[in-house]
Image: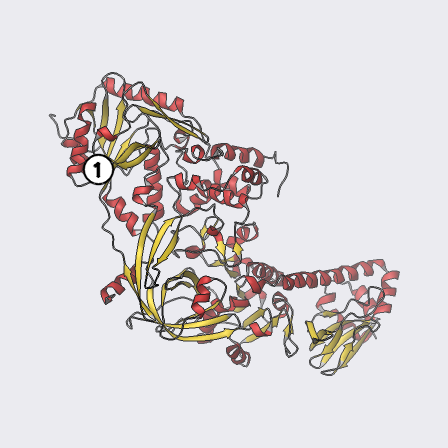
Amino acid sequence: MATSIELTQAARDPMIPVPYVVERFLRETNDTFSLELEPFDPTYELAFRPGQFNMLYVFGVGEVPISISGDATDTKRLVHTTREVGVVTRAMRNLKAGHTIGARGPFGTSWPMEEAKGHDVVLVAGGIGLAPLRPALYWILRNRDEYGKVVLLYGTRSPEDILYSKELAKWRSQFDLEVHITVDRATTEWRGNVGVVTKLVGRAPFDPTDTVAMVCGPEIMMRFAVEELTKRGVAEANIYVSMERNMKCGVGLCGHCQLRGEFVCKDGPVYRYDLIEPLFVEREL
Amino acid sequence: MTDLYPIIRSQEFFKEFSEEDVHEVAGCATNIVLHPGQYVFREGEPANHFYLVRHGKVSLELLLPGRGVVVVETIEEGEPLGWSWLIPPYRWHFAARCDTLLRAIALDGECLRNKCEANPKLGYHLMLRMAQMMESRLQASILRMLDVYGDKH
Amino acid sequence: MTRTLRIGDQVVLDRERLAGLFEAIRKLGYVVHGPILSDGAIVLGPIESDRDLPIGWRDRQDAGTYRLERREDDAVFGYAVGPHSWKRLLFPPKRSLWRAEREGARFHLLPIVEDTPKLALFGVRPCEMAAIRVQDRVLANGQYQDSNYASRRRQAFVVVADCHEPGGGCFCASLGTGPTEQGEGWDLAMTEILQGRHRFLVRAGSSKGLDVLRALPWTETSPADLQAAERQRQRALRRMGRRMNPEGAKELLYQAASDNHWDEIAQRCLMCGNCTMACPTCFCVTVVDRTSLDGSQTERERVWDSCFSLEFSYIHGGSVRFSPYARYRHWMTHKLASWQDQFGTMGCVGCGRCIVWCPVGIDITEELETFRSRVGGNREAVR
């Protein structure tokens, strides 16, 4: 039996997971789901910045890095959205309310919420890449006066793969937020845009000379999105991307996430594009 | 006809064209308005026009026997529509259906082709612009074909 | 013994008094580890006294080659470095991090708090001392710390031994990490002198070291001792098997990222990862979960890992560095270039282990020069 003393100790060492209780399991789409977690220790205060991630641990199965997709002002509840792609995330799918899960973190850099103040903000999300951007959107909506025009451009494979569809519908009806969604493959019922998400960049309503862009999705999609943004006139120094690499420790000690001189887990995952541009195009770094 | 000049001049597609060239192009232009559900053109029909969407949204669709109508791409304000007017046998491969009220400039294909023949410089500029549009559609198609959201992230 | 010794004072200890040094160290509660003969190599293991050392042995090393020979003298430190490095002790290949026990739908996490051993590292070469300093920066002096390493390192008593018999793979002299440049971070440093009376020049680098040295029957050094040490140093420099020119290595390798020569190296490289295991600075690890058959208990271990495996860079869907060339490029670029961005030093100390223990004898010093000549302009093809 673990005593509270042991748990406090556990919280201090970044390699030792903190136990959480699964409060709710939410099926999002066919292959994605969200977990709402609360720490075992009710006095444990959560604090994270939009864009950061946790290492989530499933008992006896293993650990994976997953971005935090909830509201940063919620200090009692941790929300993670993920796709079932490997052994650990498949085991997570079988978790139910009341089960225990371990989490270490939060780790890594965050979206430039401060730097973006006073400017237009464009969020470009592809697929599950919307999950790490959702905390940034919550942040902006809580501090709406501090930002200029706000545009969310979101692309997925098909209408069935749209994440957070209820929330998106709500956001779309707001006057202070532009939401454009597009799918690669339409179904017969789909009445929205069809085409790649990067195409939305060209016609989105924002002032390219006064915009901070945050881009998250598969690396190739981010590359095309950055190209479209710069074509519109957004400076590379105002574009931020979120990188993905293998991670085992989350604190820059295991070496797995290296991208040349970068430890993506602590120097990233969020990077200013102009600072990693050469690493973006070189193959297999 | 010449009263369409300011509208064409303001189109992103013709942004880098000279005054002279825009006047030439305007000579082939008409203004059209279509209602939601109406077709701009249908697959197999002669492709007589090139369109610039000024307002509204158009779905490019194809009927797949057994699967029904599939939208392959949507075209919105500021975007050009159609290149079959340029390439023999000048027939549409897709149908274009209005999702909303549509306001567009329609440029007569034969008229444009004749002007390009007579004025190769204009022809070159127009072909260059068409090629850019085709290139970005091709890039977009490749990206979609890769199904990047399927396997990773 | 008429004066009070201070840190840095160099004195003489006769060969016959070496056993006393071991006793003095052990008396302070240290478990002494040092070079021993085992399985045809000089490796690291626990030692009780000077008799356990590979007295009278030397190693012959070159690319892909290592063998032991008897010496004609009774040198205590008459060899270069073996396949083991001190990271085995300060950063063990395997360590348990925590355990977890299942209780219904819940589980409890139990940290494993290890009483880190008080280690004395005996016979650390200057290049290896440099490697320990490199690992100190990586594992103990960053934003996050490997607390186990830090604790082992803090407690360790380090005895450096100057190198008088460099091997064919060695190139410490060109990197300023040897054969006698001990730098900082040790408690005692020794120079073995074989000419004339078999003896050691010894100095303390810390108060711990000074306490030990003061308790020994030392004598004052003579000019002849210093001359003998210098002659030996000169001889060692001449026998250094290789050299590396670190000048501009970072810019050079970044510039060479798309050079076709990586493919050529990859055709020879077996992706075995020997270089990463033998390297005294490589620090990459992974974690392994071991779960009991009934699923009630699990334990997490962290184990050494190698960037040469496909699994190393795996993200769902595939490995980032799937081509062999990309994995060799990552390792070499990390050692000589990106390490500088990360930690302000090179990740290479010139010990030559990666050359010697490479089954196909790939030579990092030679490959660097190849890139230098190609980036210089004579590069026939670019990827």
Q: Residue at x 30, y 44 (%)?
A: C90
Residue underneath mark 1:
C206
Above or below residue C108? Residue C279 is above
Q: Position of residue A22 (x, y in %)?
A: 37, 73
* Snapshot quadrant of residue A186: bottom right
* Snapshot quadrant of residue B65: bottom right
Q: Is residue C342 visible?
A: yes
Q: Please give the chain letter of the residue carrying mark 1.
A: C
Q: Position of residue C149 (x, y in %)?
A: 30, 48
Q: Residue furthest front?
A: C293
Q: Quadrant of the C terminus of chain C?
A: top right
* Snapshot quadrant of residue A158: bottom right
Q: Position of residue A40 (x, y in %)?
A: 30, 71
Q: Nearer the viewer, residue A153 or C171?
A: C171
Q: Residues within 10 Å of mark 1 (few under 14, many from 20)?
A: some
Q: Residue at x 60, y 35 (%)?
A: C377
Q: Residue at x 47, y 45 (%)?
A: C308
Above or below residue B64? Residue B101 is below
SS for callout 1 = loop
Q: Nearer the viewer, residue C287 or A232?
A: C287
For badge 1, the amino acid type reads Ser
Judge left or right: residue B66 versus residue C129: right
Q: Residue at x 39, y 57 (%)?
A: A250
Q: Nearer the viewer, residue B123 or A243?
A: A243
Above or below residue C157? Residue A78 is below
Judge left or right: residue A284 versus residue C154: right
Q: Quadrant of the N terminus of chain C?
A: top left
Above or below residue B136? Residue B38 is below
